[in-house]
Image (cartoon, rainbow, N blue to C red):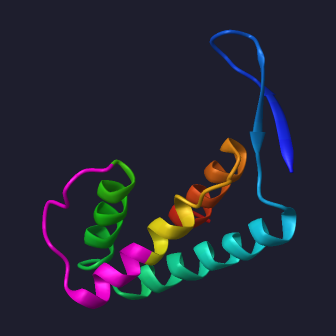
């Protein structure tokens, strides 16, 4: 599906591809589920996982290597949040679903 929006810098209309609603909804539910998993891991582990996700999304090295199970969790979160084909609005929605609610 193509989505049109105005580029804030040039004022030109830009077309971006977007996942269809069903695929996006599946990713949204999974992002919320992973957020709950991270929260259940507790106050000592959750910040390290969030930092790992942020580092991977920003293409930076992780400050502290994570154990394999936590690294797999980070990999899954990043796969969802950095999914090809997301519109900018969808990407923000997934990031919001993982970080808050």
Locate residue 68, reporting x and y percent. Answer: 24, 88
Could you tell whether 60 is left or right of 100 in the image? Answer: left
Q: Residue at x 52, y 80 (%)?
A: 34
Q: Residue at x 74, y 76 (%)?
A: 26
Q: Is residue 5 left or right of residue 28?
A: right
- Give coordinates of residue 10: x percent, y percent: 67, 9
Nearer to us in this view, 47 or 59:
59
Asked if 58 appears above or below 83 in the picture, the reply is: above
Say whether residue 82 is left or right of residue 26. left
- Above or below for 83 versus 37: above
Is residue 50 one of those drawn in magenta?
Answer: no
Residue shown at 27% from the left, 79% from the top:
45
Picture layout, residue 56 above or below residue 38: above
Please say if 52 is above or below 85.
below
Outermost residue to the top: 10
Q: Quadrant of residue 63?
A: bottom left
Residue segment shown in magenta? 59-75
In the visual, does 95 lie left or right of 87? left
**Quarter residue 5 falls in:** top right
Residue drawn where x is 37% and y is 74% of the image? 74
Q: Where residue 3 sits: x, y (%)? A: 84, 40
């Amino acid at each position: 599906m193509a989505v049109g929006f105005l580029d804030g810098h040039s004022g030109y209309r830009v077309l971006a591809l977007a996942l269809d609603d069903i695929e996006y909804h599946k990713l949204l539910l999974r992002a919320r589920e992973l957020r709950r998993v991270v929260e259940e891991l507790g106050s000592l582990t959750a910040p390290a996982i969030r930092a790992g996700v942020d580092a991977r999304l920003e293409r930076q090295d992780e400050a502290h290597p994570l154990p394999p199970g936590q690294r797999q969790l980070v990999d899954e979160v990043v796969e969802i949040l950095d999914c090809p084909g997301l519109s900018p609005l969808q990407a923000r929605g997934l990031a919001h679903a993982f970080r808050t609610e």
